[in-house]
Amino acid sequence: MPVQLMALPFDKQSLAPHMSEETISYHYGKHHSGYVDKLNPLIADTALADASLEDIIVQSKDDPAAAAVFNNAAQVWNHDFFWHSLSPNGGALADGPLKDRIDADFGSLAGFKDTFMATATGQFGSGWAWLVVDGDTLSVISTPNAVPPFVNGLTPLMTCDVWEHAYYLDHRNDRAAFVQTFLDNLVNWEFAAQRLEEAAG
């Protein structure tokens, strides 16, 4: 079965003014859908045609001949995860296990934000900033281009897309302003907390 473009978990206009409907229309309707449209012909009539998105990524990641498959599949997965990392009611981290872990591993929510900002703005070129479970601790990492953390054994809890197409219409080239807006107003902490609970199993 072909890979499907996921439905957005919110209305396109519901993140405004923090993320404009125009940005989401281009990001989701052009970039994200473009990765889906490019991936399906690449896997049609191959052993990956009926594989899950995660399996497509894992099976193609170390094959130079399958670089286009990996890049497009990983970008579909990353964007699916990114949309779930956003919420019209985002930004506020409620008390609970996730807040306790962030306080323990980063000193405070403010300490986490400082680390995330430095990582997201420090990623050279296109990529992603992630909050991940790394063994017994939470960590903030960046990955280049299309790489998702799970291929390196890390469990992502939330992500911020720092490809320029994620923010240029709203913030021009000011990545830091976009990341700050993301952290203060858009992070879907409920999704991240659910991911942490699932990781704890």
Image (tube, rainbow, N blue to C red):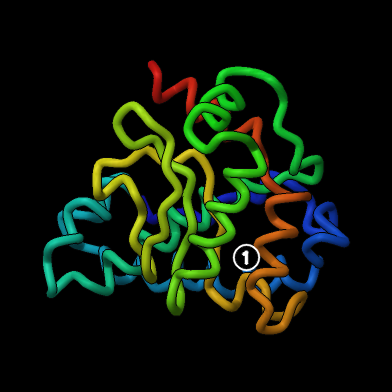
Which of these two is toward me, 4 or 168?
A: 168
What amino acid does circle 1 point to? Answer: Tyr
Which of these two is toward me, 136 or 185?
A: 136
The percent coordinates of residue 50 (x first, y second) are: 27, 48
- Seen at 39% across and 73% down, the residue is 38
Image quarter in which the C terminus is found: top left
Res. 84 in view: no
Which of these two is toward me, 139 or 77?
A: 139
Residue 173 against residue 52 in the figure, above or below: below
Task: Answer with the quarter of the image where residue 9 lies.
Answer: top right
**In the shown orientation, is residue 100 left or right of residue 156?**
right
Res. 34 in view: yes
The percent coordinates of residue 180 (x first, y second) are: 71, 59
The residue carrying mark 1 is 28
- Label 1 sits on a secondary structure element that is helix
- Seen at 38% across and 31% down, the residue is 137
- Seen at 43% across and 76% down, the residue is 124
The extreme right residue here reads 17
Task: Answer with the quarter of the image where residue 112 lies.
Answer: top right
The extreme front residue here reads 107
**In the shown orientation, is residue 112 left or right of residue 195?**
right
